[in-house]
Image (tube, grey):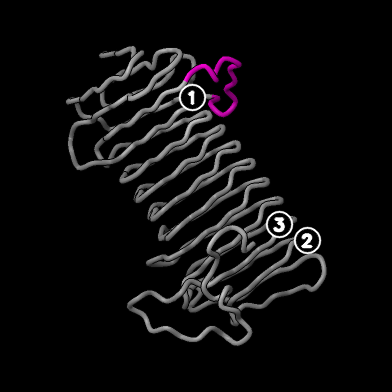
Amino acid sequence: MPEWSVTEPTKLTFDEPVTELHVRIVNGTVNVVGTEESSARLEVSEVEGPPLIVTQKGGTLSVAYEDLPWKGFLKWLDRKGWRRSAVVSLAVPAATRVEVGVVGASAVVSGLRGPSVIKGVTGDTTLVSLSGPVRADTVSGSLEAQSVTGDLRFNSVSGDLTVLDGSGSSVKADSVSGSMIVDLDPDGPTDVRLTSVSGEIAIRLPYPADTEVEANTASGAVSNAFDDLRVHGQWGAHKITGRLGAGTGKLRATTVSGSIALLRRPPREDEPWDAPPAGTTDTQADGPTDKKVL
């Protein structure tokens, strides 16, 4: 089994086929990009502290610290962890299955068709143009998904979720205190299920939309930009229910003390623009420009 101990900036090319990638780092940055090439490439541009161990066994390529296992990753604690850091970039075949774990590091994963699994203790993760299924678990790290067409599953304690131009068939997210901003532009029915205890939830739907809606908050405020939906409750608990279009998709959003906003995307360039429904402000019709609208 080929193995390298990386203690200084290094570039490696792997001619043997790579079907699975495992990366686990502390501090620094990891970038993973899918390509149409058959080979894989690694560049470690910075490394401090213990060496990174690079191994290739069969079709699995691993870049990780020896004392940082995948099992129990989110509970890993090392008082000396701040003394290590690495900046790692990898190019792998787009169909590769990828597992990335970061502690205090940022991660960018893009251009993959295979499944992706992300685990983060702290540090932000950005996903771009992934068409395979994605599972992300974080403690306090935030996740931003741009143009992700695969099913997305997100779990966090306090990390925020931002989905931009989401067109996958499923988005499921659970958080204790993290906020969720989900901007949907699906090509077909979408199953969206969002749950938070105290985090705010904002969902921007295409207009016209095609989904059954049920959104609940026990004590937070609600905002609704669709005339076809009903808002129930004036004090305390609020609920937004109804059907948009044929109702082939499903939208379920629940928060205990956070607010819920259902907002409307502007029409696509190839669709005629209709005036907003009566009583809807421009801000509601066009959706949020940043988190402050919540």
Residue bounds of the magenta highlight = 72-84
Q: Earlier in the sequence, mark 1 or mark 3?
A: 1
Q: Are marks 2 and 3 in contact (CB under 8 Å)?
A: no
Kindly identify the residue that appears in the image at 51 percent across and 74 percent down: 247
Residue type marked 1: Val
Using residue 213 as the reference point, say whether residue 113 is left or right of it.
left
* Residue behind mark 2: 219
Q: Would you place residue 225 above or below residue 115 in this image?
A: below
Quarter-of-image position of residue 233: bottom right
Tag 3: amino acid: Gly
Which one is nearer the viewer's eye here, 123 or 155?
Answer: 123
Q: Identify the mark at residue 9; answer none if there is no mark.
A: none
Mark with earlier residue (2, 3): 2
Residue contact at pointers 1 and 3, CB within 8 angstroms: no
Q: Residues within 10 Å of mark 2 (few under 14, many from 20)?
A: some
Q: State the CA–CA distance, disc 1 to disc 3.
A: 32 Å
For the residues marked 2 and 3, what is the alpha-carbon distance in whole angstroms? Answer: 7 Å
Q: Residues within 10 Å of mark 3 (few under 14, many from 20)?
A: many
Q: Earlier in the sequence, mark 2 or mark 1?
A: 1
**Residue 224: x and y, percent?**
63, 73
Residue 62, percent from left and from top:
35, 23
Which mark, by number, is residue 258?
A: 3
Residue topped by disc 1: 26
